[in-house]
Image: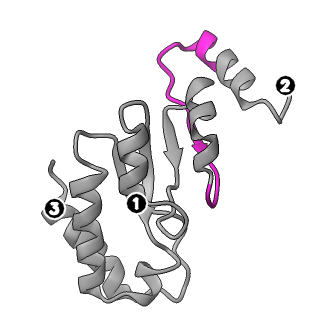
């Protein structure tokens, strides 16, 4: 299969299991390509980096056709924010991107060693507190 044509691979996977969900990972600003990814069968977009794309705007534009994985900044809030910053970002994401479903709340990438433990705890506490929509 051609590595440059994910839609072809996705079509093969869907023939084997029509109920499969297709998740795609791409770093950075990819908004111009989102409509094409939807057209070829994308279900879940990962990671939605808030440093590159506005998660709420992406949800408004494509939320009726996609689910979103990530949305919590690993280059900003996790390493440099306070626990209160983390709490506010979680609340905002759940209220905007989570509204109507389709949010898999998570860091936009893996956490690096410079992330304060308090921010990791704040992430889980806020997710529990605000995580119902």
User: Which residue is identified by label 3?
Assistant: 130
**Is 39 one of the magenta-colored residues?**
no
- Using the image, determine if residue 35 lies above or below residue 30: above
Q: Residue at x 26, y 54 (%)?
A: 96
Up the image or down, 56 lies above or below 61; here it is below
Contact flag, marks 2 and 3 (Cβ < 8 Å):
no
User: Dots 3 and 1: beta carbons under 8 Å?
Assistant: no
Q: Is residue 133 left or right of residue 45?
A: left
Magenta span of residues = 13-29
Answer whether residue 22 is magenta in the image: yes
Instruction: Please indicate whether residue 42 sits to the left or right of residue 8 in the image.
Output: left
> Mark 1 — residue?
106
Residue 98 image offset from top left, x and y in percent = 27, 49
> Which residue does the numbered mark 2 point to in the structure image?
1
Residue 89 location, quadrant: bottom left
| Left or right: 12, with 83 as reference point | right
Coordinates of residue 42 in the picture (x, y in percent): 55, 31
Question: Which is more N-terminal, label 1 or label 3?
Answer: 1
Label 3 SS: helix
Specify how the rendered protein is coloured: one colour
Q: Position of residue 61 (x, y in %)?
A: 41, 41
Label 2 vs label 1: CA separation?
A: 31 Å
Q: Quadrant of the N terminus?
A: top right
- Residue 121 higher or lower than 99, as above or below: below
């Amino acid at each position: 299969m051609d590595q440059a044509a994910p839609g072809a691979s996705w079509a093969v996977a869907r023939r084997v299991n029509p109920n499969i969900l297709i998740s795609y990972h791409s770093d950075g600003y990819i908004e111009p390509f989102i409509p094409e990814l939807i057209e070829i069968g994308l279900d879940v977009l990962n990671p939605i980096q808030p440093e590159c794309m506005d998660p709420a705007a992406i949800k408004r534009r494509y939320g009726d056709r996609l689910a979103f994985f990530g949305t919590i900044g690993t280059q900003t809030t996790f390493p440099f924010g306070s626990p209160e910053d983390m709490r506010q970002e979680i609340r905002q994401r759940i209220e905007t991107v989570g509204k109507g479903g389709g949010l898999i709340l998570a860091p936009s990438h893996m956490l690096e060693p410079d992330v304060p433990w308090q921010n990791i705890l704040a992430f889980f506490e806020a997710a529990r507190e605000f995580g119902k929509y």
